Image (cartoon, helix red, strand yellow):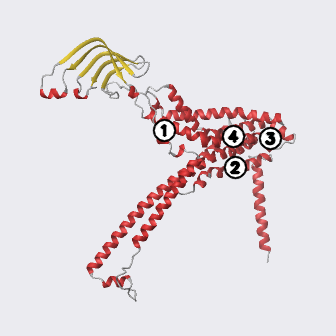
Amino acid sequence: MKKLSKLIIKSFLGPFALTFILILFILLMQFVWKYLDDLMGKGLDWTIIAELLIFQSTNLVALALPLSILLSSIMTFGNLAENYELVALKSAGLSLFKIMRPLIILIFLIAIGAFFFSNRVTPFANLKSKSLLHDIVYHKPLMDVKEGVFYNGMAGFSIRINQKDEETDQLKDILIYDHRLPESGNARVIRAKEGEMKKTISGRYLILDLYDGVSYDEQSTAATRKKDKSTPHLTTEFDQMELRIDVSGLQFQESDEEKWTNNIPMQDMSQLSTTADSLAAQVQRRMDNLNKYMTKAFHITRDSVVQNNIESKSIYAYLDSLSLENQLRAFRISYNMSNNSKSYLTTAASDMSHRSRFINKHWNEWHRKLTLSFACILLFFIGGPLGAIIKKGGLGLPVVFSIVFFLIFHITSISGEKMVNSGTLEPFQGMWLSSLVLLPFAVFLTYKAANDSQLFDWSAYEKAISKFKKGRITKHADSSAMP
């Protein structure tokens, strides 16, 4: 039995590792393609991009793990059934559950690991990837100079290059305005026919080697130029000039991660529940304040100085007793009070609706950490029996069935989450909707595989339907025969 367990686990781990890496790579390439424009052309070190991809791949485990378990379980039991190994094991007296037992234990261990991974590792990876991606997106490129357009990304300089060779970094027709001294304006202008661009080893300075050019230096400030129209200047022609520009401010710098720690994906289950409870308490306090306001707004306190009338008058009789001026004044006050109350109620309702949706998002993330583990178990009990029924291994038919069931799982998960955010469903109902939809499939396929029933044997379904109809007819006839 130990050899059989090792054989089944070994036959599962190979496809599982292969499909997990492949699916994770595909999802990661989708992320790279989405942010390709933000990653390229900014002079980022390869270690920064590698760090971002590592943290982002950690976040994609929640999608890759269930799909890889589904696909590898179909492939494993499909291969066993296709090679008649499953038939041989059953003829030896082993039931399907005994054959699946080592993998069931393994899947439960993977599910437990997935729970701790999503609760501990994923929030940390979300924090790192979010902060790093934000810094990369808003990072200014070191020298993103477009041909014929002035580049003002470096403090103190405006540079225009009419021609640029991307491969050799050769520059032609260069115009540079040096305004490092604000009081002097564009006092220094440099033109060069050709040039080269390179960085120092430390990366702090950008060196422009200029060839065959001229430099114009005004020998006065902007204030003196207003007083004296004649401005002395110095013209210098050069064959070669080296211009060293400080670009330390353009180097990549990581921002403070503290500003992201309160985001929902960056919290574990204990933090999510604590935050949701505190927000719920705020909503309750808001509701209590609303009740107090409405009670004060519409509760009329009788004047204690005025003697109470023995016979109470109706509101209409009271209004008729007032003068026309006082009636108009009463109507105007009532109208203003109603408008104020309506405005207050509208604002309060919008605020509480927003707070409730925000609370639901916290509980969505809380349940998501549990549904990942349950999805691993559920999809295994779909994939394993399905592979034993279709008797096909490899990457053909198993991939088709895997995509179908995973799309059902993914679409229902997204739909359930959106219905929770809109207030249609409670967080528990919406986040577990996908599991509730797939659970009948898992039970049905496991039952069919355990009893060696043919999934696509339509005659069996026809017999069951005819038997059901016959039972209905017999029951109806018996009820008609009763006096």
Determine which residue is flagged by label 3. Answer: 99
Determine which residue is flagged by label 1. Answer: 257
Spot occupied by residue 7 in the image (x, y as percentages of width and height): 79, 33
Q: Comparing marks 3 and 1, which lies closer to the viewer? A: 1
User: Disc 4 residue type?
Assistant: Ile
User: Disc 2 residue type?
Assistant: Phe
Say if mark 1 contacts mark 4, CB within 8 Å: no
Spot occupied by residue 143 in the image (x, y as percentages of width and height): 38, 25
Instruction: Look at the image and tell me in which quarter the C terminus lies.
Output: bottom right
Q: Residue at x 27, y 23 (%)?
A: 178
Q: Secondary structure at mark 1?
A: helix
Q: Quadrant of residue 299?
A: bottom left
Q: Secondary structure at mark 2?
A: helix
Mark linked to residue 110: 4
First along the sequence among labels 3 and 4:
3
Please rate how many residues cluster around mark 3, counting C-alpha atoms within 10 Å: few if below 14, some from 14 to 19, many from 20: some
Say if mark 2 contacts mark 1, CB within 8 Å: no
Determine which residue is flagged by label 2. Answer: 441
Pick out the residue farthest to the bottom. Answer: 310
